[in-house]
Amino acid sequence: MSGLLSIRDLSVRLPRGADRSHALIGVSLDLAPNEILCLVGESGSGKSLTAAAIMGLLPGPQVFAEKGAILFEGRDLLRLSEAEMRAIRGARIGMIFQEPMTALNPVLPVGRQIEEVLEEHTAMTRAERVGRVLALLEEVRIPDPASAARAHPHELSGGQRQRAMIAMALALNPRLLIADEPTTALDVTTQKHILGLIRELQRSHGTGVLFITHDFGVVAEIADRVAVMQHGRVVEQGAAEQVLNRPSHPYTRALIAAVPTLAHSPRGRDFPCAPVLAVRNLSKTYRAAGLFARRRTVHAVKDVSFDLHRGETLGIVGESGSGKSTVARCLVRLLDPDGGSMVVDGLDMAALSRARLRREARRVQMVFQDPFASLNPRRTAGDLVAQGPMLHGVPREEAQARAAELFRLVGLDPAAMSRLPHEFSGGQRQRIGLARALAMRPTVLVADEPVSALDVSVQAQVLRLLRDLRDRLSLSIVFITHDLRVAAELCDRIAVMHEGEIVEHGPTAEVFAAPRHDYTRTLMDSIPGRTWTPPALEPA
Amino acid sequence: MAAFRRYLRSPAPVLGLVLLMAVIAMALCADLVFPRDPLALAGRPLQWPGTNPRFWLGTDGSGRDIAAQIFHGARVSLLIGVVATAIAIALGIAIGAVAGFYGGGVDTVLMRVTEAFQTLPNFILLLVLVAVFGSDIVTVTVSIGAVSWPAPARLTRAEVLSLRNREFVLACRTLGMGDLRLILGEILPNALPPVIVYASVVMAVAILLESALAFLGLSDPNVASWGNLIGTGRTVIRSEWYVSAIPGVAILVTVLAVSLVGQGLNDALNPRLKERT
Amino acid sequence: MKFLAYAARRLAASLPTLLILLAGLFVLLQFAPGDTVDALMAQAGGGDAVMAAELRRFYGLDLSVPERLAAYLWRLVRLDLGFSAIYNKPVATVILERLTPTLLLMASSLSLAFAAGMVLGVLAARRVNGWPDTVISTLGLIFYATPSFWFGLMGIVVFAVKLAWLPPGGYGTVGAGYAGLRLMLDIAWHLILPTVTLALIFLAIYLRIMRAAMLEVLNLDFVRAARAKGLSETRVLVRHVLRNALLPMVTLIGLQAGTMLGGSVVVESVFSLPGLGRLAYESVVQRDLNTLLGIVFVSAILVIVVNFVVDLLYAKLDPRITATG
C-alpha cells in the first residue's frame, strides 16, 4: 500500500517494573493521504503511545521503540536524527491534544504560540507571520481572530481553545495530523463543531488524519477506516462501515456491544401512585462577592420542578454549566437551595435544619462520579459500606453483615471487604460507592455521572447492574448525565437542562423521537454517530 | 511497612537516619560520658583539640570542655527542636483545620492573624518575645514554637481546603456525619502526611533559630548550647577558630540529618498521594 | 486598569494585617517587666521615685493600656515612631540612619540567591538524577543546614584572617574618607562576605524550588505540545518551561522577605554592620522597647512593600491572576 504513513511491526518497550514489558507489540497501521483513520481502544490500550512514537516523543530513555519501522513519506522516522525529526514535527506532522487548556502555555498569548511554529520552520518576517496567524484563526472560524490572537488561553472558551490548537497544528499545512482525543474534554454541541471543522479542513487540504478516540459514536461520525487496539496490539483494522457494523474480532464485538444504543429506549411505564420525590421551584444562585470586585450573581438553577415515582429513573441531561450537578447536590443538601421545596415521603428536605438533616440522611443518597476520589483511601471497602448504618446506630456486627450482603448484591466478593480502595479497579470502586449508598436503604438514589469516568465495557457492566438493582429493589433514581446515549439506555423519563432551567421534560422515547424545544433538538443533533445504530451482537 | 521499605531504598535518607541516631545517642549518653557540669571550669583555657587527651575537642576561652558542651548541647538542641516543633505543628494543624474546614468569616479572621504573624520577620518577633518574657529555656522554646506555627497552619489549611470538597468527604456528609467526626476521621488523616513531613522543616528551622539566639547571647545562659559556644568563641576567632568551628559542625550535622529524614519521609509517603495519574 | 485594581486590592488587604500585628505587639509589650524609664534610671545609676514618675508622665507611660494603644496607633498613622530614650533621638531618625546598610544587604543577597538558585536549579533539573543534580542538590542541603552566623565566622577566618582577601567586617574602611564611586566600591567590598553569608540559606531554598518547578512544568501538556511543534530544546526551555517555572520562585521572594530581614540581625551582628538588624539586637539588650517596636513597624512595612512588588510582578508574569483576583 502506497500510503502516507505506514507503521510496520512496531514494538515499544516499557521500563522494568511496569505492569507489562511492552506498551506496543507488533503494531502495523496504514494511513493514506486524505483519509481519516480512527485508532480506538480503552485506557491503557497503547493508542496514545502510538501517537507519541510517531512524533518521536516517547517519554524518557526507558520507553523506546524496540523494533519495527514508522515510514512517513518514504522515510523511517525511527532512524532520523533529533534535528531531522524536529524539522518534521510541526511542519510535516501536526498534533492536537485532548485538553486544550493544558496543551496551551497559560502565560503566552494564543497568537504568539501559533506564530512560534512559523518562526521555527519558516523564514517569514514578523509581519508575515502575524498576517498568517490571523488567516489561520479565520480559517478555523474563531470569532474575532484579532482579539483571539492577543488573548491568553484562559480568556477563551474550551471550543475556541481547541480551534486555536487546530490552527497551530495546521499552520504549515502538514501532510499528517495526529488528533489525540481532541473532543473528549468538550461538550457535545462543541464536539460536533470541532469534528465538523477537522473533517472539513482535512478534505480541503487533503491531509491524512490519525484520530485517536475511545468513543465509537465519534468513530461513526468521522472515520474512513478504523483500527482497534487492545493491550498494545492492533486486533482489528478495516473500513469504518465494516468494523462498526460487522466487527470480526471478539474484543471489537464486545466493545461495540457495550455501546448504548439510541434506538431502543426503555419501556414507558405508568406510575399511578403519589411520587416519592416532588421537587417544586428549586432555585440556587451563587454570588461572587469581594471587597473591590463587582458583585455577580449566577443563577445556577432556576425554578426547577419534577416528580419521581417509586421504581422510576429520571434522567437529568445537559451540558457543563447547565445546572444539572447543582440540582443533584441540592437534592442531598450538599448545597442549600435558595428557594423551593424537595418533598421526600412527605418531608420537605429543603427546610430541614442541619441536625435534623443528619438524622434524615438516609432518605436521599448519592453515587458520585469519580471512582478514585469518592472513596477514602484509608478505609477498607467493608468499613466504607458499613460506615453509614453505623453512624445511625446500627451495631458494628450487623452493619458489617449488611455490608457483606451488599457486596454480593453489587457483584463483589465479600472476602474483599478488608481491602483498601486502591486495590480495586475503577468499575469495582463504583460498585463499592453504590453499595455505600444502598446500605442506607435510601428512598431516592441520586447518581451524579456515575459511569462517565469508566471505559465503555466497564460502563456497560455498571449500567447493567444499576438497571438490574432498580428492577429488583424498586429503586427510585435521579440519574445525572451529559451522555445522551447512557440516558437513553437507562432512563424512563428525561429532563433536559439548559442554563439552569428544565427546557424539556417527558418520557425518554418521546423526547428522543420528537424533541420539542430548540435546544433539545440541537443537543440530539450533536450526538456523535446518531445515524449509526450499533448492530445487535452477543457480547463475547 | 511499604513506606518504610521505600524509605530505606535510597542512600540519603538512610544517612540522615544514621546521623540523627548519632545525635540522639550523644544527647542520651551526655550524662554518662560527661557527668560533670559542662559549663564548669575543667582545665587550662584554649587548649587545641588533640593536645590534651582529657579534652579531645579542646577547651574554650573559659577553660570549659568543648566535647562536654557538644554532648550536652545535643540534648538542648534536640529538646528545643522537638518541643518547639510539637507546639508549632499542633497550633498550626488546629488553626489550619478550622480555617480550611469552616471557611467564610472564621477563615478570613484566622488567615489575617496568620498573615500578621508572617508579615513580621520571625527572628525579630522572637527577639521581641525574648525581650518581653525573658530568656530562660522554657520561654525560648515556647517562643520558637509560637513564631513557627503560621507555615504549618497554611499548609494544613490548603490540604483541608482541597479535601473538604473531595467526593469521599461529600459522601460522608450525605451519610449524615457530623463536623467533628468529618474533620478528625476523614479529612485530617489524609491531610496530615505532608504536614508531618513539613515538621522536619519546622524542626530544622527551630534548631537554627535557637542557635542564632544563643549565638547573640539572648538564650538561656545556664544551659550548654552550641550557639552559645560559637558566640563565646568569637572573641578568639582569629587564632583559636576551632572553638567556634566545632559546635557549628554539630549544628550543621543535626539540621542536615533532620532535613534528610524529612525528605526521605516525603519520598516514602508521596507515592500514595500521586498514585493516581 | 484591571491590573491596577488588582494591585490596589492586594495593598488594601494588607492594612488590616498590619493593624492586627501592631495592636497585638503593643499589648504584648505591656507584659514586659520594666519599661524605658527603668532602663534609663538603671543607666543613670539610680534615681528617686518622684523623678521616675515625672519621666513616666513625660513619656506618656502613666496612661491606661487602651489609651496608650490608641495614642500609639494614632502616632503611627502620622509616622511618628516615638522617642528613643537610649539614643536620645526620635526613633524614626535612629531607624533611618540604619536603614541603608540593611536594604543594600537584602537587595544584594536576594539577587544573588535568586540568580544562583535559578541557574543551579535549571542545571539540576536538566540532568535530573545525574551527577550534576546530585552535586547541586547535596550542596543545597548543606547550605540549608548551615547556621549563617557560623558560615560568616568561618568566612572571616578563611577570607579575612588566613587569606586576607576581604575585610573582616564593618561598613567601610574606617577613616579612609572616600567619596563618590570610591565610597561605593569600598562599601561593596565590605558587603561581599555578608551578602554571600546571608544569601546561602536562601540560595538553597530557591535552588530546590526551581528544580522542583522545572521538573513539574517539564511534565505538563503544553511542553509536550511545544515539542510537537518542532521547537528546538532551547526554545522549549526558555519560552515555555522557564517562564512558568519562575512563578513559584517569584512567590517565594515575598514569602522569604521577612525571613531574610530576620537573618540580617545575625549577619549584621557578625560583620558589625550598622544596620537595622543590629539595631534590633541592641535595642533588645538595652531594653529600648520604643526602638524595638519602631523596628517591628518598619520591618512589617518593608515586608508588605516587597510583597506588593512581588504581587505586581506576578500579575505581569501570570495573566490568569488578574482574572480570578
Image: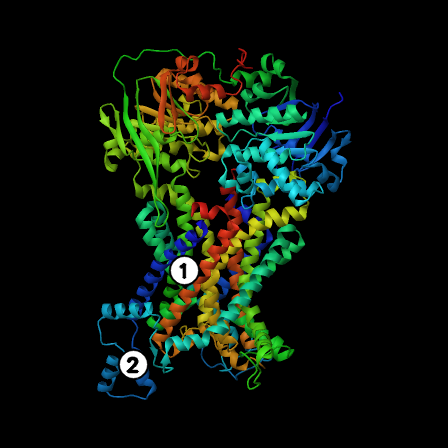
- Which residue in the protein does label 1 denote? B118
In the rendered image of this protein, does residue A153 appear above or below residue B12? above
Q: Which chain is disc 2 placed on?
A: C
Q: Look at the numbered disc 2 and give the secondary structure of its residue.
A: helix
Residue at (55, 72) in percent of width and height: C194
Q: In this view, does A450 lie to the left or right of A456?
A: left
Which amino acid type corresponds to the residue marked 2 in the rendered image? Val
Residue sitting at x 68%, y 25%: A206
The location of residue B59, given as percent across then percent down, is: 53, 79
Q: Which amino acid does label 1 sit on?
A: Gln
Tell me, for residue A294, which label it has, or none: none
Which residue in the protein does label 2 denote?
C37
**Badge 1: chain ID:** B
Using the rendered view, name the quadrant where residue A359 is placed.
top left
Where in the figure is residue A146, as x and y percent of width and height? Answer: 55, 39
User: Which residue is pictured at 31% across the width and 33% down the height?
Assistant: A284
Asked if one can make out residue C194 in the rendered structure from this viewpoint, the answer is yes
Residue C141 or B248: which is nearer the viewer? C141
Q: What element carries label 1?
A: helix
